[in-house]
Structures are given as C-alpha cells and as structure tokens.
Amino acid sequence: MNSGIYGAISGSQAMMNQLDVLANNLANVNTPGFKKDTISFEAVMAASVLQGSDGSADTPALATGSYAIDFSAGSVKVTDNTFDIALDGDGFFAINTPQGKAYTRQGNFKMDANSKLVTADGYEVLGGGAPIIINGGSVSFDAKGKIFVEGQEAGSIDVLDFPKPYDLRKIGSALFMPNDPDATPQATKDTVVRQGHLEGSNVNALEEMVRMIETTRSSETCQRMIQSYDQLTGKAVNDLGKV
C-alpha cells in the first residue's frame, strides 16, 4: 500500500485529537481558573529512520501528539464577593479532594454547613495544611492570605507553588495534582491575594474558534487525500486485472 495514505490517515487522526482539545477548551471558556490544554505534533517514522530496518526507503511518516497545559493566568474580574479570591502572581490554592491533596487557581469559594471554606464542588480549602473553619459574620483576607474574622486574625489560606516548568496533571476542570507523588510545594513569597476578585479561564474564545476552523479544514483535506489514495489504489487493481 502506498505509504502516503498512512500519512493522510495519521494526519486525519491528529486533526480529530486537535478538535477534541479545542472543543474542551471552548466548553470551559467561562470556568473560573480553567487552564487550557494544548497539543503539538511531530512527524516520526513508523518503523525507523534507518535505511534497511524494514527493507523500505519510504517508511511512512506518522504524526504523534504531545499534550500540555497552558498555566498562564486568566483575566481577573472584580466581583466584590467575600469568598471570591484571586491570586496575583504564581501559585495555587491547596484543596482536599477524594483523590488526595490537589491544587487550583479557581477561587470561587463558599462556606458549607459546617462553617468550612470549600470550593464550588464542596472540597475543603486548606490553611496551614488543615481545613479552614470560619465562625463569624465579617470575614476578610489580606494581601498575604491572612484571614480576619470580626477584625481578629483567625488563620491564613495556603498559597503554594511548584518548581517550573510545572509537572502537574489535571484531575478536574481546574484541579491539578503533581505527577511526582513526592513533590512538595513551597509557600509563595510575592504572590498577592485579592479578595473580591476572581480569575477566569485563560481560554481566548476567538483564538480557539479560529484554530477550530483551521483544524476542520485540515481534517477535510486529509479526508480528501485518503479518498484520492483509495481511488488510485482501486484503479491500479482494476487496471492490473486487465493485463
């Protein structure tokens, strides 16, 4: 079989993967603290670039995808909500989840029935490595993350960071865990905690839509190439049968 069809099929699959990534990014354009996914491709030889490895000099080139997370900050808007908190700088909030300790930039917190500070999904927000319990009506957070209840200091919210480049994986739309279970985050030094603010998604809807259109066109091109190779193969078989 002509090696070109392998490249066309591989390209079509790559475009489908790209569309999946773009669709997920667009679906989370309004998710606070969401970090968009990216995928890049490179061509590799299906067997080996060394001549003679499979007795063929036209080993097909296939596209392999590499996924990554864009950790750039999203835009921050003013909400004036007491428990909306944004981070101006590097770092993450620490969260208790069923899978273990996780980290997020999603700061739309709330109080649960037990006076614990929790995420929108109900996971405990940590301060000093423990759940934050707030008893009182007037609550404020200063720029260093200290918590004041009725004007009295009552703890602080953890703001932690990992060495860059981040080696984190997603366990939810805006939750991350380190790939190395032994990785230990450190408290940030210069990050400013902003109460009454909320960091949004870092997805640019217009850019993602443009990429989706481009990717769809590339996918259609690959499909046409596959059809052309298929027609050529069919014609060759038919012509050979007439000899």
Image (spheres, rainbow, N blue to C red):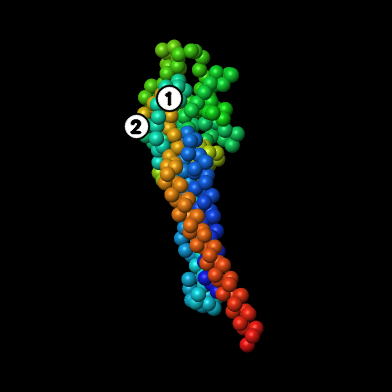
Residue at 49%, 35% in the rendered image: 31
Please name the amino acid that badge 1 sits on: Thr
Please name the amino acid that badge 2 sits on: Asp
Compared to residue 17, the image places residue 150 above or below, namely above
x, y percent for residue 235: 59, 77
Compared to residue 9, the image places residue 74 above or below, namely above
Q: Is residue 119 left or right of residue 206?
A: right
Q: Is residue 169 visible?
A: no
| Residue position for label 1 | 79
Compared to residue 59, the image places residue 18 above or below, namely above
Towards the viewer: 163 or 5: 5
Residue at 41%, 12% in the rendered image: 151
**Which numbered disc, 1 or 2, marks the residue closer to the eye?**
1
- The CA span between labels 1 and 2 is 23 Å
x, y percent for residue 124: 54, 27
- Quadrant (top left, top right, bottom left, bottom right) of the C terminus: bottom right
Residue at 45%, 25% in the rendered image: 84
Towards the viewer: 84 or 102: 84
x, y percent for residue 234: 61, 75
User: SS for tag 1?
Assistant: loop
Are there few (<14), some (14-19), or many (20+) residues within 10 Å of tag 2? few
Q: Is residue 221 visible?
A: yes
Compared to residue 226, the image places residue 116 above or below, namely above
| Residue position for label 2 | 190
Are there few (<14), some (14-19), or many (20+) residues within 10 Å of tag 1? some
Sequence-first disc among 1 and 2: 1
In the picture, the disc for residue 231 is none
Residue at 45%, 16% in the rendered image: 139
User: SS for tag 2?
Assistant: loop
